Image (cartoon, coloured by chain):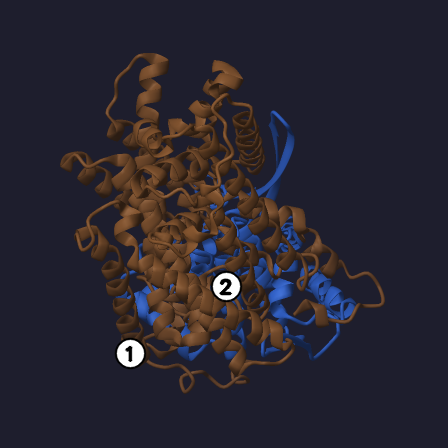
């Protein structure tokens, strides 16, 4: 099978979090928001715009990237110089900002479409994968690579980490055998940079806190 | 924490967004009171306690416990600002007295909370059974009704359906109003004669004082949850402290007054009536003033509020179990949620399984659901919570001995020392008065079973912590941090932790770019 194109990290996570049969989100809006928030911050790290150290964000380059979603987050980081805690930024971006940015980026490329659902209490706007094949791309790619014993690149390793942190692994990695699992864990341990490990760890902790506070 | 951040020159969108849900004093008081279940205590625990222990000094016990808890709360609320996972006693104990005792305490709390919950199943069955016979003319054994509410709680728990905050709030206000109205009605009862017995300070030092104190502690369980909002309150230094004192005072006044009015209005033989009428005593003494409509309303509210409290408490236990699973203090499976709902399913299933076993055992053995399940379970859990509070008070001292920065001597040392001394005395009285509390012969099985169970669970927890220290140091390091722990509970953290230590396996930061 020809390998599907790799999208920006947060887009891949968004697609992975949507059912490839019905297009519905597999995660609660809060948990998806936390995952996407961490993914966007991860993209900034991959663009070499920020570093993360001791739970704080350090801007190392303030040039725009050409990617609207990432640039929007970077602009806001520059505006809000008083706030540098990774934890606060994940919480803030997860209030709907990250989902919004990612949905807009994906609609621009036509990979998701806007769906208006009329209910009893007004209209709800949903974004669903335009093509059910598309929703399955990233997860299939990661699973195939792991099944073959191939190395994942850093964005895909980060994606796999966020799949674990959000609990999506109960869907995505359910069919992975223990060898594939060990292979993944080993790569996460050895090849994923420490600052990205910490970022995913922060996202996972935020998910745990949301569950505790009944916000999940 | 956030008190030290300087104000940005322009209004920050981030600060505004994160501050939107900050809570004030009233909201925190309300949350704490909603865990208190006033009718269950006033109509359930107090009359049953009168019948079982034969002691009437309950009002002064509520006041005394309130004073001790208020002194304890000084250090407790102060330490809450310094640690993660505030609201769980073991988080304080892990930091102040060491992680092994912390794990032991976390398991004791799990047992104590489950005792409350399962006691409520039994109490519901025992209280609802005669009411159903009265209302619908159907004679159902207590355990069928207990199993019905158990099943409803289990299903709602797995689906993580919570009682809507407004419904819960309305029920709470209705309960408080009802307790107040019934108690004032008692004052006009023909048999009312102001009784000095409930207020006699001598009962706090006399025989059976420990039993009274444990009953009173049971009424306050839930006050410790106020500190959950330490990070989310408007003013971290004031909001939570004020809310805690207000909640403690409200509970003491409401329960103390209601118990005094009920005993005063019950006539000469209050103990005999309590034994004969049970929870009905609370309703009966006010009945001739209020009429049968108020009585039916009171009964209906009694059952609905008990059921609402059951659902809430079940969810609290499921989340507490989830938090321990996330830390690696319980098996990892408990740290998982259902992705589509965020429900901590396995913790909920565990609670339901324990509940089912106990209900079935009691039904088969033919044990009394009101005294031996509701009252023993509830007060047994109360002993567990009292021991946890005592350990926490010592832990506050231990913590501030190591981290004295930023707090004055009264908050760090004065109040915690005073609180610890009082709590140690209360714990001693509680343990030595179990026979009176349970209404059994000194030395009989229930008197040593309860403390032994807590001791065994504590020792098991300590041993488990020592196993973790040598086999999984990263999990050990995260004990007490709750869901924020970097233990192994989360799937990702588990993957990263692996079987070996990290550190040396971490790649060079730059080589991927």
The location of residue A108, given as percent across then percent down, is: 67, 50
Which shade of the palette goes to chain B?
Answer: brown
The residue under the point 34% across, 26% down is B128
Q: Quadrant of residue B273?
A: top left
Label 2 element class: loop
Query: Which numbered tag is attached to residue B85?
Result: 2
Asked whether the residues under marks 2 and 1 belong to the same chain, the reply is yes
Label 1 element class: helix
B346 to A66, vertically: above or below: above
The location of residue B419, given as percent across then percent down, is: 50, 66
User: Residue B232 versus residue A162: which sits nearer the camera?
Assistant: B232
Closer to the N terminus: mark 2 or mark 1?
Answer: 2
Residue most extreme to the top: B137
Task: Decide: few, some or many residues near mark 2? Use Cα within 10 Å; few <14, some 14-19, many ≥20.
Answer: many
User: Residue B295 versus residue B455: which sits nearer the camera?
Assistant: B295
Q: Quadrant of residue B5?
A: bottom right
Say left or right for A64 vs B420.
right
The location of residue A164, given as percent across then percent down, is: 42, 61
Query: Which numbered tag is attached to residue B471?
Result: 1
Q: Quadrant of residue B139?
A: top left
User: Residue A102 versus residue B405: which sits nearer the camera?
Assistant: B405
The residue under the point 55% across, 25% down is B185
Which shade of the palette goes to chain A?
Answer: blue
The chain containing the residue under callout 2 comes to B
The chain containing the residue under callout 1 comes to B
The residue under the point 55% across, 23% down is B188
The location of residue B169, given as percent across then percent down, is: 57, 36
> Residue A186, can we see it?
no
Q: Of the residues tagged 2 and 1, which is closer to the observer?
A: 2
């Amino acid at each position: 099978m020809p390998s599907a194109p790799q999208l920006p990290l947060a887009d891949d996570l968004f697609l992975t979090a949507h059912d490839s049969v019905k297009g519905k989100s597999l995660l609660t809006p809060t948990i998806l928001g936390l995952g996407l928030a961490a993914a966007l911050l991860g993209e900034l790290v991959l663009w070499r715009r920020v570093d993360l150290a001791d739970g704080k964000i350090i801007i190392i380059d303030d040039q725009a990237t050409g990617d609207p979603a990432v640039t929007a987050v970077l602009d806001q980081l520059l505006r809000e110089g008083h706030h540098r805690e990774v934890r606060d930024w994940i919480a803030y971006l997860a209030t709907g900002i990250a989902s919004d940015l990612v949905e807009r980026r994906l609609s621009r490329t036509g990979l998701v479409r806007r769906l208006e659902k009329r209910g009893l209490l007004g209209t709800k706007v949903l974004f669903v994968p335009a093509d059910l094949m598309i929703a399955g791309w990233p997860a299939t790619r990661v699973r195939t690579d792991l099944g073959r014993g191939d190395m994942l690149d850093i964005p895909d390793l980060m994606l796999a980490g966020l799949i674990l942190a959000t609990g999506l692994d109960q869907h995505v990695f359910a069919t992975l055998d223990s060898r594939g699992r060990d292979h993944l864990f080993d790569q996460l341990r050895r090849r994923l940079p420490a600052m990205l490990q910490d970022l995913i760890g922060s996202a996972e902790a935020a998910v745990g806190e949301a569950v505790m506070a009944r916000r999940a | 924490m956030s008190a030290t951040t300087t104000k940005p020159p322009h209004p920050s969108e981030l600060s505004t967004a994160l501050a939107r849900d900050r809570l004030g004093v009233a909201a925190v008081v309300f949350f704490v009171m909603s865990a208190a279940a006033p009718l269950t205590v006033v109509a359930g625990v107090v009359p049953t306690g009168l019948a079982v222990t034969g002691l009437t000094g309950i009002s002064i016990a509520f006041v005394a416990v309130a004073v001790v808890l208020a002194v304890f709360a000084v250090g407790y609320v102060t330490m809450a600002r310094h640690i993660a996972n505030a609201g769980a006693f073991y988080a304080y104990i892990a930091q102040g007295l060491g992680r092994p005792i912390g794990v032991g305490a976390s398991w004791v709390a799990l047992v104590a909370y489950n005792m409350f919950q399962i006691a409520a199943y039994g109490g519901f069955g025992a209280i609802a059974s005669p009411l159903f016979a009265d209302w619908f003319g159907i004679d159902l054994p207590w355990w069928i009704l207990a199993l019905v509410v158990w099943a409803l709680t289990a299903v709602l728990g797995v689906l993580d359906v919570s009682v809507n905050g407004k419904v819960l709030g309305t029920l709470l206000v209705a309960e408080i109003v009802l307790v107040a109205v019934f108690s004032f009605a008692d004052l006009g009862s023909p048999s009312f004669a102001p009784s000095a017995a409930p207020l006699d300070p001598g009962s706090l030092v006399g025989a059976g004082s420990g039993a009274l104190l444990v009953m009173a502690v049971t009424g306050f369980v839930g006050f410790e949850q106020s500190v959950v909002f330490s990070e989310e309150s408007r003013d971290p230094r004031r909001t939570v402290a004020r809310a805690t004192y207000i909640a403690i005072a409200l509970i003491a006044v409401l329960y103390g007054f209601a118990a005094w009015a009920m005993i005063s209005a019950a006539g000469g033989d209050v103990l005999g009536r309590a034994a004969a009428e049970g929870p009905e005593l609370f309703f009966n003494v006010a009945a001739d003033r209020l009429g049968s409509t108020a009585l039916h309303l009171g009964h209906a509210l009694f059952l609905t509020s008990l059921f609402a409290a059951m659902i809430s408490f079940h969810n609290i236990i499921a989340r507490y179990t989830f938090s321990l699973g996330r830390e690696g203090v319980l098996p990892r499976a408990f740290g998982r949620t259902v992705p589509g709902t965020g429900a901590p399913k396995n913790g909920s299933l565990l609670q339901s399984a324990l509940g089912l076993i106990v209900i079935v055992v009691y039904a088969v053995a033919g044990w009394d659901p009101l005294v031996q399940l509701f009252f023993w379970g509830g007060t047994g859990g109360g002993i567990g919570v009292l021991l946890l509070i005592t350990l926490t008070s010592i832990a506050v001292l231990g913590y501030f001995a190591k981290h004295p920065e930023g707090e004055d001597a009264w908050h760090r040392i004065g109040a915690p020392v005073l609180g610890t001394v009082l709590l140690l005395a209360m714990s001693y009285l509680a343990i030595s008065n179990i026979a009176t509390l349970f209404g059994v012969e000194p030395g009989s099985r229930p008197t040593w079973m309860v403390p032994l169970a807590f001791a065994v669970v504590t020792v098991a927890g300590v041993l488990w912590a020592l196993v973790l220290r040598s086999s999984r140091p990263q999990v050990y390091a995260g004990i007490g941090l709750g869901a924020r722990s970097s233990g192994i509970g989360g799937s990702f953290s588990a993957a990263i932790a692996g079987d070996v230590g990290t550190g040396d396996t971490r790649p060079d930061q730059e080589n991927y770019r």
